[in-house]
Image (cartoon, grey):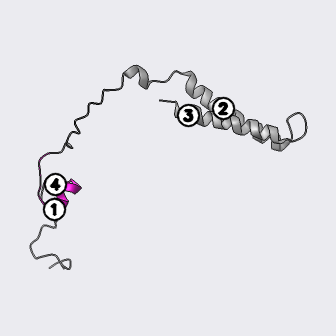
Amino acid sequence: MAKRAPGRPTGSSGRTTPKGTNDKATLAKGRPTKEKVPPSSGRYTPPIPREQKVSPRWVPALMFFFLLGGAAVILLNYLGLLPGAADDRYLLVGLALITGGFITATRYH
């Protein structure tokens, strides 16, 4: 005969919640409901039109250009391959390009 878990009554199926419940609020109240949809708030939220959900093709291209260009400027500055001495202006330009890439990434849908 198999050992039973401590605290579990003999002959129990192991289910601790009533069948058909999966909502934490319902479980906290102790009564199961058949309703799976949350109650409506009374506010109307219009659907987002499809033409606003799609970004133009140039947005991800610009994003990658900014991110890779900024990383390249910083890398070339540290390698000493840019004209002039290694300067903080190159670092600022690289960081500005990377920041532009992050801003463009937030506009991508």
- Determine contact: label 1, label 4, CB under 8 Å: yes
- Determine contact: label 1, label 3, CB under 8 Å: no
Q: Relative to 29, say whether 5 is above or below.
A: below
The earlier-in-sequence mark between 3 and 4 is: 4
Which corner quadrant of the image does residue 50 belong to? Answer: top left
Instruction: Please state which of the two labelled residues, at mark 1 or mark 3, is closer to the viewer.
Output: 3
Q: Secondary structure at mark 1?
A: loop
Q: Secondary structure at mark 4?
A: loop
Identify the mark at residue 4; answer none if there is no mark. Answer: none
Magenta stretch, residue numbers? 20-35
Residue 80 falls inside the magenta stretch: no
- Left or right placement of residue 84 versus residue 44 in this view: right
Q: Which residue is pictured at 16% across the width and 62% down the height?
A: 17
Identify the mark at residue 21; answer none if there is no mark. Answer: 4
Amino acid beneath label 3: Ala
Residue carrying label 1? 17
Which corner quadrant of the image does residue 93 belong to? Answer: top right
The earlier-in-sequence mark between 2 and 3 is: 2
Amino acid beneath label 2: Phe
Rounded to the nearest angstrom, the CA distance separating label 1 from label 3 is: 45 Å
**Residue 58 position in % (x across, y down):** 57, 22
5 or 47: nearer the viewer = 47
Residue carrying label 3? 105
Q: Secondary structure at mark 2?
A: helix
Q: Quadrant of the N terminus?
A: bottom left
Rounded to the nearest angstrom, the CA distance separating label 4 from label 2 is: 50 Å
Q: Relative to 51, say whether 85 is above or below.
A: below
